[in-house]
Amino acid sequence: MKSHKSLFTFLTLGLSLSAVPSYAAAPNTPEQRGYAGSLYVGAEAWRQSSTVFDYALFSGQSLVGGLSFASYDIEEETGRGIEGDTDVMSGSVGYFHEFEGFNIGLMINVLDANLEVKGSNTPAVSELDNDGDGFLVTVGAGKRWDSLTVTMQASAGELSFDSERLSAFPFAKNADYDLQILGFELAAAYALIDEEAYTLTPFAKLGYVLLENDGFEEGAAGTPNDARIYADFEDEQPFVEVGVDAQLLNLAPFIPRASVSIWQDLGDDEVEYETDAVTYKTPDAVQTVVEARLGFDWAISEEILLGASVGYFAGDEIDGVNGDLALVWRF
């Protein structure tokens, strides 16, 4: 993913001091808000881990490998002050087992991400490039009673970011910082229609994700510059998701499936940030998301199952695509 990093060209060292605006004149340049991108990436990391884990949980005694991706655009919203795009990819491996009617699992995700933003509605140079990587560990369990399925899972992990910020000052600002992720989810699904040819299953999820970004200090190669010190910041995301999943069974062992869902953040709709110069607030990445997905399950043999899906999602000022691929080996 490091190859995704764009290189920006801006002011030359030959600029005179009189051409450089004072920091006091613009203490909160828009691209600083791009550091909120760590929260956007953390939320997507949770989604990728949760999706693959849910898919594999009821596969019996098995090993599972997965690949996930997401690419989305951040559009201008009043108070956000930035626009840009984000790419997140992950690979996962897990072990799942059925024990006395319960299905349990352990999975590890390794992630890589890139976030590029620029300040909106500003003629000056205002850009921030974040590269991140890290991991998530997920454990969970589930049980089925006839038409009812109940699952729960918990994840914890950390992402590390390297960033480069460009503003009207002639020296790039660089920073390294970490994001901790902690999440929990309880889900229930009920097979409302279970025919030989197709199924229709409504589902609901209730969860909580905590994203904590460590404080950090920017560094610059020379002066003048507007390098800042940032305090710790965090975002709490209690959420609910409801939707319906459908499967077409008469093409077995190849089973097409589709789903639609609505995700709602139940917490505050903004995050507060503090630097050594100013305190400000910026909107959350998203409050409401509507998503549609298409995919399939393919039982290649009794031991091997392949599943894949792609989705389009839109919410507030963010929209994009994501996809997940999982290979299950039962033994």
Image (tube, rainbow, N blue to C red):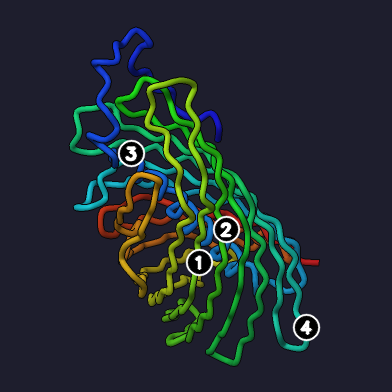
- Residue at image mark 4: 99
Q: Nearer the viewer, mark 4 or mark 3?
A: 3
Kindly identify the amino acid type of the residue bearing the numbered disc 1.
Leu
Q: Which residue is mark 3?
A: 31
The residue at which mark 1 appears reads as 210
- Residue 222: x and y, percent? 46, 20
Label 4 environment density (alpha carbons within 10 Å; few <14, some 14–19, many ≥20): few
The answer to whether marks 2 and 1 mark residues whose Cβ atoms lie closer than 8 Å is: yes
Circle 2 sits on which residue? 180
The tag earlier along the polypeptide, 4 or 3, is 3
Which secondary structure, mark 4?
strand
Would you say 163 lies left or right of 167 here? right
Instruction: Kindly state the secondary structure of the residue where label 2 is placed.
Output: strand
The foreground one among 200 and 222 is 222
Q: Earlier in the sequence, mark 1 or mark 4?
A: 4
Residue 179 in the image: x percent, y percent?
Answer: 55, 53
Callout 2 environment at 10 Å: few (<14), some (14 to 19), or many (20+)? Answer: many
Q: Please determine whether, in this image, residue 295 is positioned above or below residue 172.
A: below
Marks 4 and 3, how far apart at CA:
51 Å
Please name the residue shown 27% across and 28% down the image.
22
- Please state the horizontal and vertical placement of residue 209, each as a whole percent of the image: 50, 68
* Amino acid on which the number 2 mark rests in the picture: Gln
In the picture, which quadrant includes the C terminus? bottom right
Q: Quick one: label 2 or label 4, which is nearer the N terminus?
A: 4
Q: CA distance from mark 2 to mark 4?
A: 31 Å
